[in-house]
Image: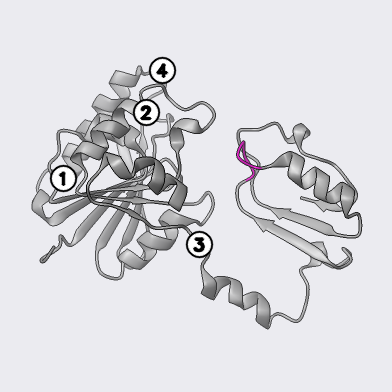
Amino acid sequence: MTNLPTNLICFSHLRWDFVYQRPQHLLTRFSKDYNVYFVEEPVFDSDGDAFISFSKREENLWVGVPHLPDGLSKDDVNELLEDLLHKFLKKEDLSKFIFWYYTPMALAFTETFHPRLIVYDCMDELSQFKFAPPELKILERKLLELADVVFTGGVSLYEAKKDQHDNIHAFPSSIEREHFLKARRKNAEPIDQKSIPNPKLGFYGVIDERFDIELIDKIAEKKPEWQIILLGPVVKIDPETLPKRTNIHY
């Protein structure tokens, strides 16, 4: 498509400051060519009127957090979010905007808008996560109908959804090579790993219900000389269920 819009609004279920991963990798790059607005899910801490707070993170990249009163129904939440978005875009020409979705749940308050381009970057099968809202599958079907292009975060996701859209592409997630190459230039070990003997095996990422706890436990049991270092936040699972061995380090 020629003459692409110059503005991009991303609707994400992940917070910008949580873990630096696929959304941050891509949107930081996009901000070199577009004005990027990363809209997070709401927080319920407003004592008065609902509002969106924006903080600038890169030259052309802003993170927006909707602040809403507590105790609202789902319908009230979506109505307020839609109103806040209308106010934000009140004087804007939507033909100059791309809507980029990481969560189909955002469609509940954005369906009435008509941007120039709609992108669904399906980085995970969110319906399989713990505590997934029951309406998520319905909204995803709607989003697949509206989207101009769909990307998937892996080949298996592509295979599962390739028949649901005629412009869908496997776009597997990876690592930021430039960032991890810095480790090759470091001569000193991190202080918290200095006393751990070699060989070390590392994992970097979110530790949640997708994490193979039993596999890690078995590896640690079968190979006591291997030191397993796990870096990342523990979410949606009880930390007490994680394996505890002398050669597993969190």
- Element on which disc 1 rests: loop
- Element on which disc 4 rests: loop
Sequence-wise, the earlier of marks 3 and 1 is: 1
x, y percentage for residue 34?
A: 24, 64
At x 84%, y 59%, the residue is 227
Please name the residue that numbered disc 3 is placed on: 174
Nearer mark to the viewer, of 4 and 3: 3
Magenta stretch, main secondary structure class: loop
Mark 4 crowd level (few <14, some 14–19, many ≥20, 10 Å Cα): few
Mark 3 crowd level (few <14, some 14–19, many ≥20, 10 Å Cα): few
Sequence-wise, the earlier of marks 3 and 2 is: 2
> Does the image show residue 50?
no
Distance of mark 2 from mark 4, alpha carbons? 21 Å
Q: Amino acid at mark 1?
A: Leu
Residue 71: numbered disc: 4
Q: Is residue 46 left or right of residue 91?
A: right
Sequence-wise, the earlier of marks 4 and 3 is: 4
